[in-house]
Amino acid sequence: MFRRLQTHQGKVVTVCVEGNDVRVPAGDSVAAVMLAMDLLPTRTTAVSGAPRAPLCMMGVCFECLIEIDGVANQLACQVQVSEGMRIRRQHGAGDPAS
Amino acid sequence: MNAPRELVIIGAGPAGMAAASTAAGLGVDTLVLDQQPAPGGQIFRGIGQAGPAHLELLGSDYQAGTERVASFVHSSADYQPDTAVWSLGADGELGILQRGEARMISARRVVIAGGAMERPIPFPGWTLPGVMNAGGAQVLMKSSRLVPLDGVVIAGSGPLLILLAWQYMRAGVAVQAVLELAPRKNLWRAGLRLPAALRAGHYLTRGLGYLLALRRAGIRVTYGVSDLKAVGNDRLEAVTFRTGGREQSLETGNLLVHFGLVPGIQLTEAAGCRHQWNDGQQCWRPQTDAWGNSSVDGIAVVGDGAAIGGAVAAVHAGCLAGLEAARALEHIDAAERDRLAVNDRQWLQNDLRIRPFLESLHRLPETLLSGTADDTLVCRCEEITAGEVRAAVRAGHRDPNQVKFITRCGMGPCQGRQCGQAVANIVAAACDRPVSEVVPFRVRPPLRPVSIGELSMLESGNNTA
Amino acid sequence: MNADVVIVGGGLMGSSAALHLAMRGQRVIVMEKDSPGRHASGVNAGGLRQLNRHPAEIPLAAAAARLWRDIQSLVDSDCDVKLSGQVRVAENEADMRLLEERAAQVRALGYEHEIIIDREQLYRLVPRLAPHCVGALYTRDDGFARPFHALTAFRHKAESLGVQYRTGSRVHEVARQGEDWQVVTDRGCVSAPVLVNCSGAWSQALCSMLGEPVTVNTGAPMMMVTERLPHFLDPVVGAASRKLSFKQMQNGTVLIGGAHLANYDMKSETTAIDFIKLSESARSAVELFPHVRDAHIVRTWAGLEAFTPDHLPVISPGSCATGVFHAFGFSAHGFQLSPIVGLILSELIIDGKSELPIGPFSIKRFLDETATGCA
């Protein structure tokens, strides 16, 4: 679990995480939001349903796959939040157009 | 396709920024493509938004980034962030993706400055949520000011362990333990390389400073650790390990692991550059000359993507590659290039003197590289265990690519980035051959995620990049 | 003499031939320059397709289909075969007329496996297909398998019957030595009275050494595969007026081929994907299955394959010398035929003839009067 070092002073955006609106720093990656909210696991695998969470934070491990705005298999660590973004944890093989 | 750009630089970390500033300063038409939204690479992530307190917290190496980024931003290089490079041909043709639009561009010369990644080492429980790469956690601190809760355990091998513990300590995080998994005997080997390292002594004094500060704060640093395991059901609950012949267990929700860095070789592999095994760094690296030129004409590679040398060495190597690009593109002649290169070459040499010492100190034992337990997952994507890899070898598939074909190990979304080296090590050991002799996974584009829809629009994309 | 038969090429055709020969007691050595399946045999699309084959190939494809249906008993592995059918969709009335003509032609030859299905039947079979299609040509007992698994099964079964594979053995020279063929590789020589050429994209070299009159072209059909998607498709889907092969594998990944060719370099034996051409396959995929638009491509690749001038394979004795047999030039549609091709070769070699009509595949069809041929 992670915590934020100091109160964020900069720009914030509202995103919808698992159906709930939350205000988060504009510079955050989706993975940072999920870790800050402790929403682990962020996905279960397509192969066995095993729980997984972000690992590398630099776009090379593909463990942070997540559904963003209805599109599955997005790299949470490489996508910055934007106003109105809808984020959902991914269960198994996400339908690309669910 | 539009006329080729003179120079395309892939990556805006220390090496890419330096190469770009240098080449653009000599009149080269320079395009810099970077995956991140802001310049700085992984090492200087979030530096544009970092206030004075944050800069102070992260230390002097991070602070140096402010100046580097500023000089890059003020150069005449055409900088395009949020750009993924998903293919690179030996002819200098690049597939890029920007804002959901894929297109092909071409370059007369390419400098790859894509950096490194943390070396993946499979160990029991490494897929549990709560286990994360230490460098990844550091990115969270740099760019989102996120730190783990008290009780975090940091484990693995490499200078980052101590640096991160020090940064967390300054941020008020109670680090429970730092576990160094390199064998104790490394100290003797490293000792032999100490005299040379003293010529880059500032690294040693800084590292010792971090260690002393940790000791004063009562943070435990344990050496000679083995048998690291992450334990938990759906997420991490504890870390177990052996030290001094005893099994120990620490309760924690955060295990941050780091086993050094390895060059990211997807781009150089895709372009057909020749690679070689680097025994000191225990990884493959693209073969380069003193200017960063790869074996493929017109393609250079610099920074940690060429060999792990750190941010300062990357800057100097980047400058040299920028000069060489200007020469190859006939903006300066060889004599001018050589004259301008003198200082960078000297600084580069001096800076790299620390490396043999660090490599010996943090050299990983074979147990971590090829000794993965049979029931431990090697391929996180396709969920293939070390035992399945060994069984494939026994069934006659005696090279990593055949193992990949038969087991699907390395065929998942990460394209073998996470399991490739482990598979090579395990296959080599199972075949009783040195790993330098096995052929690693062949790289298959797209190197970054491209959707079918994005590819389907490829031809119609306009080529303004 | 080291063996009864030496086979050059350890891919599917060579391994199938080795297996069938070994089953009949022949001592076989397979010379393989890399490892088996390094090129086309290991990385093809794995289609088990009788649908829309050249009339000359239909009898062979039908015989092969019977072997695939019970492949377990032949090679002790199911090769991940999935017989979920193949459809060739018509996207408009003109397409439909072409498919109907084809169906009539096949019926006239006495075969019943290719049937016309109407719009309703098509969408029951392929519910996620884009709504504009009007019908299809369909073969129920077609499907697909995993090529490298199939190859491995053939090879392991052959090895269990005594076949020796010499991997990493590139053939430099073949020469007559009395009654035998001596095959010289960079790892020593072997000799045998019978030489079989199953060397795929490298067949030209061997044909030249043997003085055969054929020109083999090289091509590397490109393919791509997506990340795993929830199950949405059973049959393999092609289209009447597109180059496309689209299938969802058992693990959920979608494999898209389209016979668009990669660039290649025979010196380094490597291929380079031509993304502009591959984007045509992507476009076809999206137009026929719009919901896969956002699925990511995990891998693209191409395997080096031999194409003959008429795109029909060569399955025949040599035209110049005795003791030579060929099976190559499958022109990117050989996978399905592989079990039967091995059987045919074993019959040709042991019995001197095959039960199947292989006349159209004779290497002699390329003989022309101006050619000097047979050195």
Image (spheres, coloured by chain):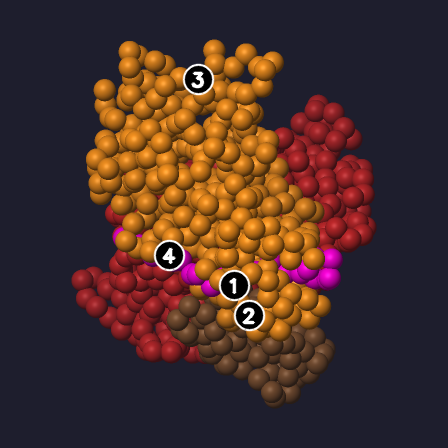
Quadrant of the drawing holding the N terminus of chain C: top left
Is residue C80 magenta-colored?
yes
Give the residues drawn in magenta, as a range. C76-96
| Residue B440 at least partly seen | no
Label 2 and label 4: CA atoms lie apart by 21 Å
Q: Are marks 2 and 4 on the same chain?
A: yes
Label 2 and label 1: CA atoms lie apart by 8 Å
Q: Colour of chain A?
A: brown
Asked if B44 appears above or below A44 in the picture, the reply is above
Subunit under mark 3: C
Amino acid at pointer 4: Arg
Asked if C75 appears above or below B129 in the picture, the reply is above
Point out which mark residue C210 bears. Answer: none
Residue beneath disc 2: C125
Residue beneath disc 3: C320
Chain-order first, disc 3 or disc 1: 1
Which residue is rendered at x = 73% and y = 45% of the image?
A: B105
Is residue C58 magenta-colored?
no
Q: Nearer the viewer, residue C290 or C356?
A: C356
